[in-house]
Amino acid sequence: MATKDYDNLDDQDDQDALNEPPGVYHTQGPLSFENVWQMFQEYREEMRQASLKTDQKFRETDKKIKQAFDLFTGQWGRLVESLVEGDLPRVMQERGIMIKRTVERAKSEDDNGYEFDIIAVNGDVCVVVEVKTTLRPDDITIFLNKLKHFREWMPEYANKDRLLGAVAYIRINSNSDKMAEKNGLFTIRTTGKSAKIVNTKDFQPQEF
């Protein structure tokens, strides 16, 4: 086995040969328990500091990704709402409902924070539309509850004789379109160019 005579090395050569940082690692003779324990503590602290720096970087990256995703989602949602709103008078007319005015992102007058994506009105008819990129069963349940309180939360429309509901979407999850129709809601599917009502021809909307 090859050996080295460390007694003949100067300080720098000794440093390179042992490949150890100065400090507790350089001791004369065998390492004591205290030396080993101190080495362990120093190593653990170095790893802890490195972990903290890594975690901070991950948190900063996650925050930036979330901000970018939220921005994209918000802009995409507005795009879909604009598409639905533009086609709403036409698609509702196909079902015999005339629309003369639409309001986008109407907020309730009290402090509950509820918002309605699109409200379309004409005379005594009011159609409230919930717009989702992906329509899920929970979305329908929440929307139906909002419709029950619509006249209370939006008193300016309380005098409308007919209050109808509709959900508009790009994609569906778990046959949500069937659930919506079963609960008396118009279902409006949007594509890159237009929107259309996909309810059956004999569908009769529920009045809320």
Image (tube, rainbow, N blue to C red):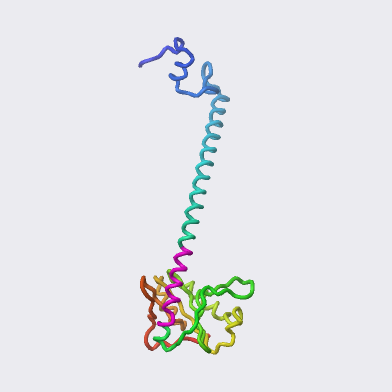
Number of labels in the image equals 0
Q: Is residue 13 left or right of residue 124?
A: left
Image spot of residue 49 (x, y percent): 54, 38
Residue 30 at x, y percent in the picture: 51, 19
Q: Within the image, what quadrant is residue 110 found in?
A: bottom right
Q: Is residue 61 above or below residue 87?
A: above
- Residue 18 rendering spot, x and y as whole percentages: 45, 20
Question: Compared to 12, does 179 lie above or below?
Answer: below
Residue pictured at 57% horizontal, 80% vertical: 150
Given residues 184 and 191, the one toward you in this image is: 191
Is residue 81 rendered magenta in the image?
yes
Extreme residue toward the top, this view: 8
Taking the view exactly as shown, the residue that stands out farthest to the right is 111
111 shown above or below 199: above
- x%, y% of residue 105? 53, 73
Placement of the N terminus among the 4 image quadrants:
top left
Q: Residue furthest front?
A: 100
Q: Nearer the viewer, residue 11 or 27?
A: 11
Of 89 and 66, the residue lying toward us = 89
Q: Is residue 34 magenta?
A: no
Instruction: Give the residues drawn in magenta, as a range.
Output: 73-90
Q: Main secondary structure of the magenta part?
A: helix
